[in-house]
Each structure stands twice: as structure tokens, then as C-alpha cells.
Image (spheres, rainbow, N blue to C red):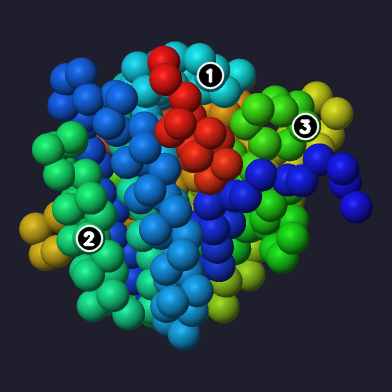
Amino acid sequence: MDSQVMPREQLGVCAEGNLHSVYLMFNANDGVEDQLRPCVANVAQYIYELSDQYADSAFNGFLAVGANYWDSLYPEARPEQLKPFPAMSAENRDAPAHEYDLFIHLRCDRYDILHLVANEVCQMFEDLVELVDEERGFRFMDSRDLTGFVDGTENPKGRNRQSVALVGDEDGEFRSGSYVHVQKFAHNLSKWNRLPQKKQEDIVGRTKIDNIEYASEDKPLTSHIKRVNLKDDEGNSMEILRQSMPYGSMKEQGLMFISTCRNSVHFEKMLHSMIHGDADGNHDHLMHFTQAVTGSAFFAPSLDFMDRMADEPV
């Protein structure tokens, strides 16, 4: 056994997919940090315990603290790679930053339980924070994006999810935590659906119906898969764990893109590759059919870190 017990991760960070989700974005009221620290620990613990209570419907979730709010809440220590969302723009492709103080990510196979828990969480935070944005996600068909393509095929499997998404010994105080990036993408589906299927497949880099990835030499340099499947200088895949789900109504719909990772570099490099492209300017042509309307950076600490900070006067 490791003499150092691994801090307890928040279970939603690496959880397998669900049928439904609720995303709550909060901003803290002024000067509430001393009350908010124990409250944050309690909310995270509450979400953690409900995973057992509602195990039949695969309930899970996590709480994450915004990059711009972190120092106010936890001035004693900061995750090494935590920084504001890397806003980017090129031609008509935009990845704007829109930061929030706290992010609550709840998922379950029962919608009613999610609604119940979201209500409970908001009550626990009462008078300390303001709910600024709320979105509800759903599984679409067999885990497809609203474009009709299967989403998250590249995700790490099994225990590998933890090794991709959770900080290890490289930043000891923040072991079992995760860097979280959230973007709400609004799709232009009427424009997308006018494309012939083969054209759609070329833009994504895999077949639509049976989800078969194009052979490497057949993938256009502007295909989505080509732009996000990156390697580092040593030739290792720069992986992230995607926890994305479709969201929306007839008015606006798209994808809540959620990346969890043990570092913040992989996401930033992928976003740069999509928006700015490679050295020859080959950018992600999927960006012609979807628009990022938000972009936020968070860190989801371990339960043990939040517990410890709840008791420490700052």
C-alpha cells in the first residue's frame, strides 16, 4: 500500500456517461469567503454521498472553483497550472472567455433526482452566491452530438480515465484534483443539415452512421479529429477526458463541452489547433457551423483539500 493515502477525488470528474445533466454557474457575493469555504466542502461532500444513495440511477457530480476566484477563496495555495480561460479569436472563429466563480456539474440517469439535488445545492449556498447561468444537458441517441456524430469516441477508458483527468504527484497538494474547461457551443444546425453527408464526414473525420474513423491519410487537415488529436514533443497523445453533453431548446441548442485533465496545457493546445490551426493555417472547419458563447476555466479540488481548507482560518 502507498503510505500516502490518495486524496478522495470528486466522483463526477471521471464518471462514465449519463442520460441527463444540470450545470450551475455561480458568482460569489462580496466578502463571503470565510462562510463559503465550509459551505463548498459541505456541498462537495453532499454530492459525493449521494452517489451511494442514488447509485441505481448512476448519480454523480463535482464542484469546481473558477480560475479568477481561486485566490479569493483559497489564498494559501494555488494549483500550478490554474489560469484564466485562454480566449482566442481568428477571422470569424471565436473562443471567448466568460468566467464564473463556482461551477456545479451534476449528472444522473433520472431527471427528477437532478432537479431535486440542484434545488438542494442552491439552498445550501443561500445568501453566499448568485446563480448566474444554468443549463440542462441530455444524452442524444447513442451518445451523439446534435450534429448527428458520436461524441467522445476518443475518451480514455476504465482506470485510464483517472490517469488522464486527475493531478498526480507532480503537484502534491492538489493530487486527485482536475483542471476543468467549459465552453457552451451553439450550433447552426440548419446550416449544418444542408450539407451532404459526405461533406459532414470530411469535416468531422469519421463516418456518420457507423462512427468509423477515417484512415490517417484520408483525414483532411481541416477535419475536427485531425485538429484535436495532438501529440507532444515526445510523441505521446495529448489526452483530455471529455464530459460533454448536448443541451438546449428550439431557440438555442448545441454542446456543453467539458474537458477534465491533469493539466491545463492539453486543452489549450487543442483549442489553439481548432481556432488558429497548424503552421499552414489549417483550422477546424467544424467551427464554421458552431459558435462558442462561453469559455470558463476551473479547478475541481479533492474532497480532502476542501475539507482541510474549510477548517483553516485565513
Residue under label 1:
78
Image position of 3 (left or right of 107): right
| 145 is higher (above) or lower (below) than 69 | below
- Image quadrant occupied by the C terminus: top left
Given the image, on which type of amino acid does mark 1 rest?
Arg
| 106 vs 312, nearest the viewer | 312
Q: Can you give x and y, in whole percent of width and height, for residue 152 in the image? A: 54, 60
Q: Point out which mark residue 120 bears.
A: 2
Task: For marks 1 and 2, give the CA distance.
Answer: 29 Å
Label 1 CA crowd tier, 10 Å (few <14, some 14–19, many 20+): some
Task: For marks 2 and 3, give the CA distance.
Answer: 34 Å
Q: Is residue 4 visible to us here?
A: yes
Label 2 CA crowd tier, 10 Å (few <14, some 14–19, many 20+): some
Given the image, on which type of amino acid does mark 2 rest?
Glu
Label located before the other in sequence (1 or 3): 1
| 260 is higher (above) or lower (below) than 171 | below
Label located before the other in sequence (2 or 3): 2
Q: Can you give x and y, in whole percent of width and height, for residue 25 in the image? A: 25, 42
Image position of 207 (left or right of 110): right
Q: Can you give x and y, in whole percent of width and height, for residue 24 in the image? A: 25, 49
| 113 vs 187, nearest the viewer | 113
Residue under label 3:
169
